[in-house]
Image (cartoon, helix red, strand yellow):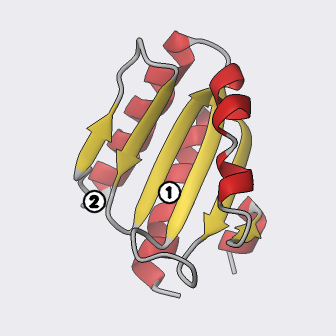
Amino acid sequence: MTDQSKEMAKIAVHALGEKKAEDIQIIDIREISVIADYFVIASASNSNQIQAMMDAVEEELYKEGYHCAQKEGNQNSSWVLMDYKDIIVHIFSKEDRLFYDLERIWRDGKFLTPEELQD
């Protein structure tokens, strides 16, 4: 486990939690994909919360020297993807999260709790 990607995931999870993200999931995909080490997935209640969560993740990771390589979506979107190379943060409306069901698609990954990231 790269310490950097784990640290990035921790920062993202904390930032999402500060903005009252719902059902935060961390999936370790290192053994099944080369696109990233972790997916961090969270749900938001409305577009304002999606924007607040995006801003919080970006701000906290930026403070630690991590820059978003690519961002898909904006506050009017119901799914935002923030690509930090080592981690990819997905912020969904509740409806879109159920529809796209990334947890099912990536079920071969290792699901971690926020507490397991602390190890």
Q: Can you tell which quarter of the image residue 76 is in?
A: top left
Query: Where does label 2 land, which residue?
Result: 66
Q: Amino acid at mark 1?
A: Ile
Per the model, the C-alpha gap separating discs 2 and 1 is 10 Å
* Helix, strand or loop under label 2: loop
**Residue 108 location in percent, x, y?**
71, 72
Q: Can you tell which quarter of the image residue 80 is in?
A: top left
Q: Is residue 116 left or right of residue 13?
A: right
Q: Mark yes or no: residue 17 visible.
A: no
Above/below status of 97 relative to 25: above
Q: Amino acid at mark 2?
A: Tyr
Q: Is residue 4 left or right of residue 67?
A: right
**Residue 69 location in percent, x, y?**
22, 53
- Residue at 44% over, 21% down: 51
Q: Quadrant of the C terminus?
A: bottom right
Query: Where does label 1 land, which residue?
Result: 11
